[in-house]
């Protein structure tokens, strides 16, 4: 089920989420196959924690990995992947379902590679949902 805060944001912008069978889209590859798009169109959102204690949300194509060195250059501090509990506390979502909309107080970095696609599909609060 799509979280209420995500539904509210989507509806305010005239959008709706795609929902799938729970557990059917746990990876970018499976999500892309389920939707019928390329893996690069799946926008995965991953939370990182800086040495400073600040959090950063990286949104990148599903076929790419986030480079820690490039993240450090972009945010000015060494980063590590946030733990599961940190991700849930900061974003309100579990890893695999992090929606980049409505995450407050976190710098969001979007990979330029996503601009290669007319339509991308980030998660919408669960690992079995997406927003076109």
Image (cartoon, rainbow, N blue to C red):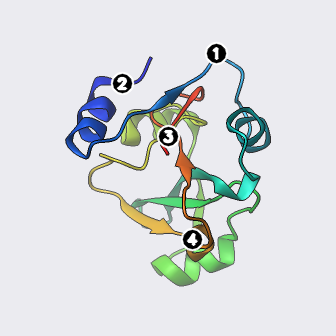
- Graded by Cα atoms within 10 Å as few (under 14), some (14 to 19) or many (20 or more), the crowding at tag 2 reads few
Percent of width and height locating residue 36: 73, 41
Percent of width and height locating residue 61: 66, 60
Query: What residue sits right under mark 4 in the picture?
Result: 111
Query: What residue sits right under mark 2 in the picture?
Result: 3
Query: Which comes before the other along the chain, label 1 or label 4?
Result: 1
Could you tell me how far apart the alpha carbons at marks 1 and 2 are, in whole angstroms?
16 Å
Whether residues under marks 1 and 2 lie with C-beta atoms below 8 angstroms apart, the answer is no
Above or below for 84 versus 121: above
Could you tell me how far apart the alpha carbons at marks 4 and 3 are, in whole angstroms?
16 Å
Front label number (1 vs 4): 1
Could you tell me how far apart the alpha carbons at marks 2 and 3 are, in whole angstroms?
11 Å
| Residue depicted at x 25% and y 36% | 11
Q: Of 91 and 51, which appears nearest the observer?
A: 91
Dot 3: element: loop
Above or below for 71 versus 41: below
Above or below for 23 versus 17: above
95 sits left or right of 54 in the view: right
Q: Of 78 and 39, which appears nearest the observer?
A: 39
Whether residues under marks 2 and 4 lie with C-beta atoms below 8 angstroms apart, the answer is no
| Residue depicted at x 65% and y 55% | 41
Above or below for 118 versus 15: below
Query: What residue sits right under mark 1 in the picture?
Result: 21
Query: Which comes before the other along the chain, label 1 or label 2?
Result: 2
Could you tell me how far apart the alpha carbons at marks 1 and 4 are, in whole angstroms?
28 Å
């Amino acid at each position: 089920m799509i979280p209420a805060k995500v539904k509210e944001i989507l509806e305010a912008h005239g959008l709706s989420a795609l929902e799938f069978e729970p557990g059917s889209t746990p990876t970018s590859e499976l999500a892309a196959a389920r939707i019928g798009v390329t893996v690069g169109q799946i926008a995965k959102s991953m939370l990182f924690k800086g040495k400073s204690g600040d959090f950063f949300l990286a949104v990148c194509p599903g076929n790419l990995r986030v480079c820690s060195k490039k993240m450090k250059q972009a945010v000015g501090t060494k980063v590590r992947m946030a733990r599961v509990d940190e991700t849930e506390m900061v974003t309100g979502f579990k890893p695999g379902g992090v929606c980049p909309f409505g995450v407050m107080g976190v710098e969001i970095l979007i990979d330029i590679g996503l601009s290669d696609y007319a339509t991308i599909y980030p998660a919408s609060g669960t690992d079995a949902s997406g927003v076109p």
